[in-house]
Amino acid sequence: MPRERPATAADPTHQPTTTRKALNPTFRHPHAGVDEVGRACLAGPIMAAGVLFDLERLASGPGRNFLEELDDSKRLARTKRERLAQAVLAHAEAVSLVSIPASEIDRIGIDPANVACLERALRALGDRVELRLVDGRLALGARAPVHERIVRGDATSATIAAASIVAKVARDRLMARLGERYPGYGFERHAGYGTTEHMDAVAKLGPTPEHRLSFNARCFAGAVVAAPTRRRKPRRASWRELPAAEMAAHLLETPTIGDRVWTDEPRLTHETRTAFIRRVLLGETEPVEAPEGEDRRD
């Protein structure tokens, strides 16, 4: 059964563009590609995506035009990445997404975290795969499904390019949300990479729980981890602060609240609790028939 082989510069089937390789007749069997994003960042998770394509179906249908646009996510403008990510979700047989947070990266190291997310993303695509391609040089663990590695595969394989686009778009959106949670760091602009803006913000504000302190960046030295900005819940008003009519209604609905809890005024002789509340809070002096079982002050 013919299968796709990793292209090399010496290989006569090598194509410098994703599209021509994807549409080569020998590469049309269902196969998967996996890529990661965020490895070199100082903050945020490392994230891997996996994409399973039936290239024969795509190449012979409306998906052909979509395949021609696929490329390394780093070469694409943001708006085009966003559009292609939606197209990948629409055309792929399966898509997986795995994220490993900064705390876990600090605990196990970036290489093991990188391998773990690639392996999990690959395994999540299922068994209906004739070829699995993984971007990069890192060897996955023994439990990983059978696969082949391609250095710079996001520039030569349609499935790896698609995976790089999905991973990049998903991570950028996550970092934008972290930018709202930790204002002042600019996560929505630099996505956690070590830009001057980012380094200056850490030096000024300190690292957040989303920063990878194990990377030993100079800006982390001696810094105290900043707490996230939390939205304060509005304080609920106590029933004691309610307007008189609402307080009276609350007291009438809650017979367990004693008189001395809300007033120093004593009840009149034979006065019921209901009449007492209405007299003190509402100014009513007309006698009120006590509800069945209510106590009277004799």
Image (cartoon, grey):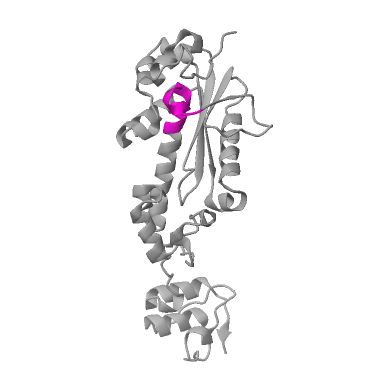
190 lies left or right of 272: left
Residue found 58% across the figure and 50% down from its top: 104
Residue 123 position (above or below residue 194): above
Q: Where residue 41 sits in the image (x, y, percent)?
A: 45, 47
Foreground pick, 124 / 256: 124
- The quarter of the picture where the C terminus appears is bottom right
- Marker count (numbered): 0
**Residue 28 seen by the camera:** no
Q: Is residue 269 above or below residue 94?
A: below
The residue at 40%/37% (across/down) is: 169
* Among the 4 quarters of the image, the one containing residue 144: top right
Residue 78 lies in the magenta-colored region: no
As drawn, which residue projects farthest toward the front? 10
Work out which quarter of the rendered image holds the N terminus and state it: top right
Whole-percent x, y for residue 160 in the image: 47, 27
Residue 110, percent across and down?
56, 46
Residue 67 position in % (x across, y down): 39, 19
* Residue 9 vertical placement versus 177 (above, below): above
> Which quadrant of the figure has residue 183?
bottom left
Q: Which stretch appears magenta? A: 151-165
**Residue that appears at 42% across and 52% down:** 178
Q: Nearer the viewer, residue 145 or 181?
A: 145
Q: Confirm whether residue 189 shows in the render.
A: yes
69 relative to 13 in the view: left or right: left
Q: Does the magenta portion include 157?
A: yes
In the picture shown, does residue 100 fall above or below 139?
Answer: below
**Main SS category, magenta section:** helix
